[in-house]
Amino acid sequence: MKKWFTLGLSLITSTAFAITGTITPAHANGHSQMYTINFKGNGIPANAEQIIQAAGGTVLKKDAALAYVKASSSNPQFLSKIQANQEVENAGRQLSIKLEKAVAKEMAVTDGDHAYYDQYQWDIKQVTQNGASWNLPGGKGKKDVVVAVIDTGIDLEHPDLKDNIVDAKSFVPGESAQDYEGHGSHVAGAIAANGKALGVGPSLGIAALKVFPREGSASTATIAEALKYAADKDYDVVNMSLGDYLFLQDPESHASDIRAEMNLFKKAIAYAHQKGVTVVGSAGNAGADITSPGRLTRFFDEENRGATHRDPASNLLIRVSAGNKDKQLTYYSNYGVGKIDVMAPGGDRGPNNNDRSYLCFSTVPIVDENDNVTGHGYAWYAGTSMAAPKVAAVAGLVISKHGKNQISPTQVKSIIKQSAEDIYKKGYDKQSGFGLINAVNALNHR
């Protein structure tokens, strides 16, 4: 492990590069292992349950729309038996995915008497052209145009957020959609805060879809379930400030595990896209060139060979790199030819690496040492996680202008790319994709 460092808020699997999650071997200590099973074609075969039972497994969840089954088994031969079935596309053990912290994170001490947009929110000003976009048709968004935030939840009673929240659902057993970590609330604020802090689209609706527990990890299946939920609820945009790095030669897992997880993620994104949802994702905070899987492997460990993939990976996704106050790629942002669509402000600590005013200011809960929410505050963060929601918000504004269900995700993506401001070379480049997002240009695009 030559080059691993704090990656900001992203999802990291138990790879050879960063072993932060675990996979319990089947039958170890009599414990059951969870499996992801993807079937060929559309739907699930009528005898899927019998197939899994015959291999020594139990069906935990099945989803015909995504053509997958989540199963458990303590039989060490379960996976090989399932993979031998002609109707199975791929199958693997469910990976444990760990939540990391932001690249930079600092609570704000505020006096409670002033609006904070003018003081601190350079990033929102950069996207909205100092609020000029709010004066255009659809420029503040509409509440029936909903951006779903798949994350750690949202601070449901935050005064800057609560009037915009149209739904709050937890996919974490035993937990509400309330955010205790802060990340999901910060993301939501960048989208639609409407109080002392402002978001890019302060009149947009937001849905809190919690997939990360207070402590621990989330599975790809849980995130896929949240994506499908958003699509079935006719939400318009999904923001996923998350991702992982999947090393196909990882000695801690099998290539089949990784392929099954990647496949399920792609199917969930495709399902949402087909249902009219624009899906936005962060590029990741490793400061890596993700152009090729081989190059990404060598970035993390120059002595290693094989393929490492940034997941989720889908050409249907709008993938976002992070820029700073000076409209340049941040030191931590991933980049790569064909891998970045646009750039948005994600923040850093400035030229001398010690100025918090270069970070992104947004909403968070105030939480005590026992994880009790004791108030509603603000914080400075940095990361590609902070960049992606600004793109999700611009997508919501474009939809607000054209009308709900009147414009396809492909058209939304095209408008965002074509209206972006060239930052590096003219046209496309590996750092900013098609350029820095610009809400005014997007709303004026014809």
Image (cartoon, rainbow, N blue to C red):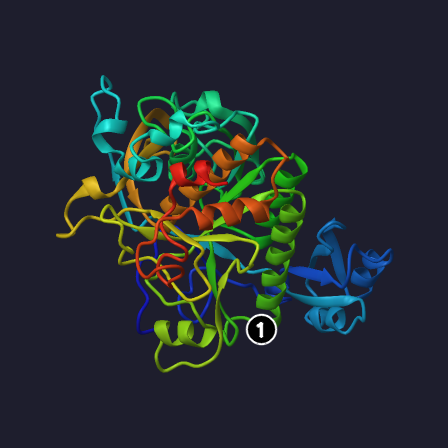
In the rendering, at what x and y percent does residue 46 appear?
A: 87, 55
Regarding residue 147, the answer to whether it shows in the image is yes
* Residue at left offset 62%, top offset 71%: 256
Q: Is residue 383 left or right of residue 391?
A: left
Quadrant location of the N terminus in the rendered image: bottom left
Name the residue: 32% across, 34% down: 362
Mark 1 element type: helix
The location of residue 411, given as percent across then percent down, is: 57, 46
Q: Position of residue 366 (x, y in %)?
A: 33, 29
Residue under pointer 1: 255
Q: How many marks?
A: 1
In the rendered image of this protein, does residue 304 appear above or below residue 184?
below
Q: Residue at x 55, y 59 (%)?
A: 315
Picture coordinates of residue 403 (x, y %)? 59, 31
- Whether residue 25 is visible, yes or no, is no
* Towards the viewer: 86 or 291: 291
